[in-house]
Amino acid sequence: MVVFRGSNLCDQGDFLIFPPGDTKVFAIKEIFVPVTLTEPGDIGAFVRAARKAQGLRQDDAAGAIGVSENFMVRVENGAEGIQWGKLFQVLEGLGLRVVVDMPEAAAPLVAAELAKLRQRQARSRNRRAAVKGGDQHG
């Protein structure tokens, strides 16, 4: 996977760096172009473009991805109140990915915040399971 960053490319996991003046030629499978979204609804245009690039109708794409056609239409139209899980399902299904650029000072905090998030999610699942279990016994 190749992502162009400025005038250089770099080899860092999924990235390749070609220093200026380097004449090596590599086969490139896919080129991802970084784009900045300025409004929440902007993502709909990317979803629609990716779907059309694959020659898919909305109903066919939705069925293949496992979401309703109504949901696909809402995403493409930039509707508010979209469910995150389903949105990421659509993005993955169409080969789109989300990359977050963050201030360098925030980077060391991400692992700790992700761990806290997983703990909160586990507590929430446990509470729901306890309530559901209590309903079955009561």
Image (cartoon, rainbow, N blue to C red):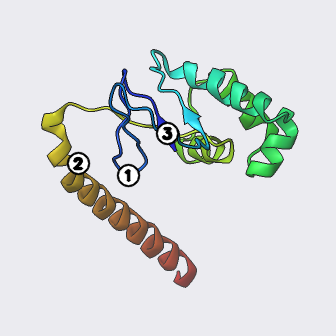
Q: Is residue 22 left or right of residue 98?
A: left
The x, y position of residue 38, in whole percent, is 45, 15
Q: CA distance from mark 2 to mark 3?
A: 25 Å
What residue does disc 2 label? 110
Callout 1 secondary element:
loop
Callout 3 secondary element:
strand
Q: Are marks 1 and 2 in contact (CB under 8 Å)?
A: no
135 over 73 or under it: above or below? below
Q: Residue at x 56, y 34 (%)?
A: 31
What residue does disc 1 label? 13
Q: Residue at x 26, y 32 (%)?
A: 102
45 over 101 or under it: above or below? above
Image-quadrant location for residue 21: top left
The x, y position of residue 69, in whole percent, is 81, 38
Q: CA distance from mark 3 to mark 1?
A: 10 Å
Q: Residue at x 56, y 44 (%)?
A: 88
Q: Residue at x 30, y 59 (%)?
A: 120
Instruction: Return the disc, 1 or 2, that comes first in the chain's sequence.
Output: 1
- Looking at the rendered structure, the kind of residue marked 3 is Val
The x, y position of residue 97, in whole percent, is 53, 40
Numbered circle sitting on residue 39: none
134 over 95 or under it: above or below? below
Q: Nearer the viewer, residue 39 or 22?
A: 22
- Looking at the rendered structure, the kind of residue marked 1 is Gly
Image-quadrant location for residue 72: top right
Disc 2 vs disc 3: which is toward the camera?
A: 3
Numbered circle sitting on residue 2: 3
